[in-house]
Amino acid sequence: MRWLILVLALATAGPAWCEDIVDVLRRSQDMRLASMAAAEPDSAEAQTILASFDALRRALPPGSPEVALHVIRGPVMAETLHGHVVVANEQLAGLPEDVRLFILAHEMGHVMQGHWRQMVMLYQKWVPGEVTRERTDPVNARLQRDASSLAHQQEYQADAFAAQTLQAMGRCRPQAEAGGLSCHDEMLTVFQQQGSAGDTLTHPSAGKRLAALRAHAYFTP
């Protein structure tokens, strides 16, 4: 959901002629994706990530939405764009497999739970019709508040989806067994990799996300 920052900037910076907010949202996604350098598709790192991604896709229930994978280079570790494209950094190949699966499953969770459509509907509520400064300036603060709140809610939901998916695959346990990682350990490793400390516009703090996961039944001893 890091693209949300770009959306808020575009929506208040004089968009192209006769754009509605859906056009602005799509343009922000296009710009975000175009800014990311693709990794070599035949590299060992890309193939490792693809194998993890395919394992997760096989674990999805029949009739699940289509989801695509783009392996990239650069500072972005993982993100979901256009509601169905999972972007994954080639550096994920160097992480423990369960951690890599958790990160990819989290991004898949955004797709499976329709988070892009939810965000589009929120923006349409606040900015109906053509996007102009006259329409965006009066609602910008409230739109940012609501978009940030929804983005945080969606992060919790994607975390829960990832934990549930890995647990169903037998990869994520409520408690560590035989020297393996627990779900809690995996999430802690994820947050350490992503440098998540306090709340941001798009993400709750690591502590809040871990607390939300602990509240689920699959973390009960």
Image (cartoon, rainbow, N blue to C red):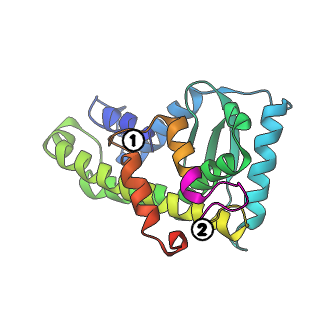
- Which residues fall within the magenta stretch? 174-185
Residue 185, image x, y percentages? 57, 52
Residue 41, image x, y percentages? 81, 32
**220 vs 132: above or below:** below
Helix, strand or loop at mark 2? helix
**76 vs 149: above or below:** above
Q: Which residue is drawn at 69% across and 51% down?
A: 98
Q: Residue 4 carries which label?
A: 1
Is residue 65 found left or right of 7 in the rendered image? right
Q: Of discs 1 and 2, which sits in the foreground?
A: 2
* Residue 201: quarter of image: top left
* Residue situated furthest left in the rendering: 138
Residue 119, image x, y percentages? 39, 55
Closest to the observer, 71 or 99: 99
Is residue 176 part of the magenta span, yes or no?
yes
Q: Residue at x 13, y 43 (%)?
A: 138
Q: Going from the N terminus, do you reach mark 1 or mark 2 first?
A: 1
Is residue 144 found left or right of 43 in the rendered image? left
Residue type indicated by callout 1: Leu
In the picture of the structure, the residue carrying the numbered disc 2 is 164
Secondary structure mainly formed by the magenta segment: loop
